[in-house]
Image (cartoon, helix red, strand yellow):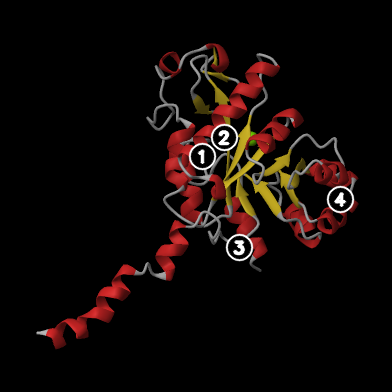
Amino acid sequence: MKFRWICFLPILLFSCVPSKRAMQNDSTTEKRFAENIVIAHRGAWKHTHTPENSIASLKAAIAGGYYGSETDVHMTADGQIVVNHDPTYHKKDIQTSTLEELRTIPLANGEPLPLLGQFLKEITTQHRTRLILEIKSSTRGKEWATKTVRKVVEEVKRYHAQPYIVYISFDYAMCLEVLRLQPDAEVQYLNGDKSPQEVSAAGLSGIDYNLSVFKRNPQYFADSRNLGIRTNAWTVNDSTLVDWLIENKVDFITTNEPEMVLRRTSR
Ligand code: MG
């Protein structure tokens, strides 16, 4: 009998040690995201005939294997973070309407107006695609903007989604507030009016600028590389412009044509 137990002992001990894979899955820092430069703008909606900024378009971006799926969020009057591009939803001002008031009309595919929490739940089911999370500027002043950032970062932490998120905003103060609340966050600035040097000195991780800014300042590519920050250009849907960005070694292209950009990067 004793001999049998000795035989089983190594098996028992081994089964108590978590495997390397399990340890990696538990880690919040060792995700292996897709190694391409494609960010689907508002999800991969165009060729999948799904609504922009819907769960369906997010799932399509994940299925496409893109590095990122971009999305936009606002805070409702009752403090819920909802996903929508415009500050209004079916003519209702999001920041002065409750979630219940907004959800009386679904998206075109029948989904209720999505909450950020639903997006975070979906994105954390996989390890390839990140959520490029645009916190929209406030129409209700600085205090509202600060509260919105706090709520968004709280939601991200609640879902343990920190490694999946790249925060972006046109509002520089909002970018800095994200960093104050989550110092290790990746944050890219959208508005195009700051040099890579300024953005880097502030602790941000990249510039996510309109293509025209890079056309006027092509030195931004090399400057950013030298500073160790990322370059991301929006919203680029033309193949010639995509090729120009690839030649200049841009880090990311935000596009409504993720299928086309992926094809061109893998030629
Ligand atoms: Mg956006």
Q: Residue at x 80, y 40 (%)?
A: 202
The answer to which of marks 1 and 3 sits earlier in the sequence is 3
Q: Residue tagged by mark 3?
A: 35
Amino acid type, mark 4: Tyr
Label 2 sits on residue: 153
Picture coordinates of residue 43, whole percent (x, y): 54, 43
Q: Check disc 1 and report the residue beneath it.
A: 157
Q: Residues within 10 Å of mark 4 (few under 14, many from 20)?
A: many
In this view, the mark in front (1 or 4): 1
- Pick out the residue farthest to the front: 2
Residue 44 lies, with reference to residue 7, above or below; the image says above
Which residue is at a point 82% across and 53% down the rendered structure image?
224
CB of mark 2 within 8 Å of CB of mark 1?
yes
User: In the rendered structure, are the residues bearing label 1 and label 3 in contact, judged by CB atoms less than 8 Å apart?
Assistant: no
Q: Nearer the viewer, residue 246 or 188?
A: 188
204 on left or right of 89:
right
How far is the residue under mark 4 from the one under mark 2?
29 Å
Q: CA distance from mark 2 to mark 1?
A: 6 Å
- Label 1 and label 3: CA atoms lie apart by 25 Å
